[in-house]
Amino acid sequence: MAKKRIAALDLGTNTFHLLIADVLDNKFEAVKEEQAHVKLGEGGINSGLIADAPFKRGLDALQHFKSEIQRFSVDAIHATGTAALRSAKNGFAFINQVKTSTGIEIEIIDGDLEASLIYQGVRACVSLAPSALIMDIGGGSVEFIFCNDQTIFWKKSYPIGAAKLMAQFHDTDPISPENIQKINLHLSNTLDELSSKIAEFSPGKFIGSAGAFETFAELVIEKFKAGPTTGNTFEFNRPQLEVILADIIASNHQSREANPLIIPVRTDMIVVASVLTQYVLSLLPTNNILLSRYALKEGLLFKK
């Protein structure tokens, strides 16, 4: 089987990712990686509209990505749009404009396929034995995948991404106890099925894929001198992670903005992502908690 150079574009609610890699069988070698923090959901995430400024940022990012794709002479482009483009009334207008200006064809994928691709990406990074629960926190949606190295047992995408939760519940600085309570109630109502699936599958590992979990890992390493991430994974000490989550939730915008370990697109969204992670941890008995730096974009490399 010949090696193929593939450009994977994961066009998320907060961040557009580009990964160009040489793929052979089930392995890949990254050639170029880049991300653009377009914040596509800004100003319209809960009304189902891409506002003018993020619409333009998205187009600009994809025109730049196109120039990189041409520079690296790829054989195929796998471009997918997720929650923001799925739900936006003008999502198809954006897709059509991208095709006209760049030639890139974006496929809108549903939450079910998104979860499957995340599984493929994470599986290429960490062992899922004996069993695992993967959580991927996006801006518009969150995917949960119960699985092992061979198969997915159950998967579901929920419209409770960090941008959505922030727009709905984070209106004070720091976030108020009342709003934390409201988020937890919202999560309890939305994720009732998740609790029963945790009881059913008893996952031995809890894996956070990319995104906020990368920031959690950096903060744990800094505060507890926990040692660097080994390649594309990091193993959390549960009590240390819980301290970091509590620190983030109690912090104000100014302190987060001044912290170089928190990238600007996550300055505020990291708060609700921490509340969500805290909630899911409260349902899980396992202390085996990992970061996978691989997620959807890596899974896209293996998409048929």
Image (tube, helix red, strand yellow):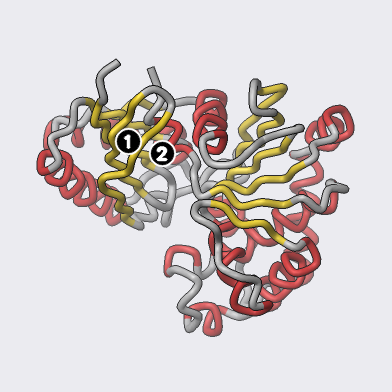
Which residue is depicted at the point 80% across and 51% down? 185
- Residue farthest toward the front in the current orientation of the protein: 1
Which residue matches tag 2? 297
Mark 2 lies on a secondary structure that is helix
Of pointers 1 and 2, the one earlier in the residue sequence: 1
Q: In this view, does 260 lie to the left or right of 199?
A: left
Residue 103: x %, y % from top left? 14, 30
Q: Which mark is residue 209?
A: none
Which residue is depicted at the point 61% across and 72% down? 221
Is disc 1 surrounded by few (<14), some (14 to 19) or many (20+) residues within 10 Å? many
Which of the image's four quarters has the N terminus?
top left
Q: Which of 10 and 124 is in front in this view?
A: 124
Q: Do the residues labelled 1 and 2 touch (CB within 8 Å)?
A: yes
Residue 30: name its quadrant.
Answer: top left
Is disc 2 surrounded by few (<14), some (14 to 19) or many (20+) residues within 10 Å? many
Mark 1 lies on a secondary structure that is strand
Q: In this view, does 123 lie to the left or right of 105?
A: right
Residue 174: x %, y % from top left? 65, 77
Which residue matches tag 1? 8
**Amino acid type, callout 1:** Ala
Q: Which of 275 and 7 is in front in this view?
A: 7
Q: Is residue 254 above or below residue 155?
A: below
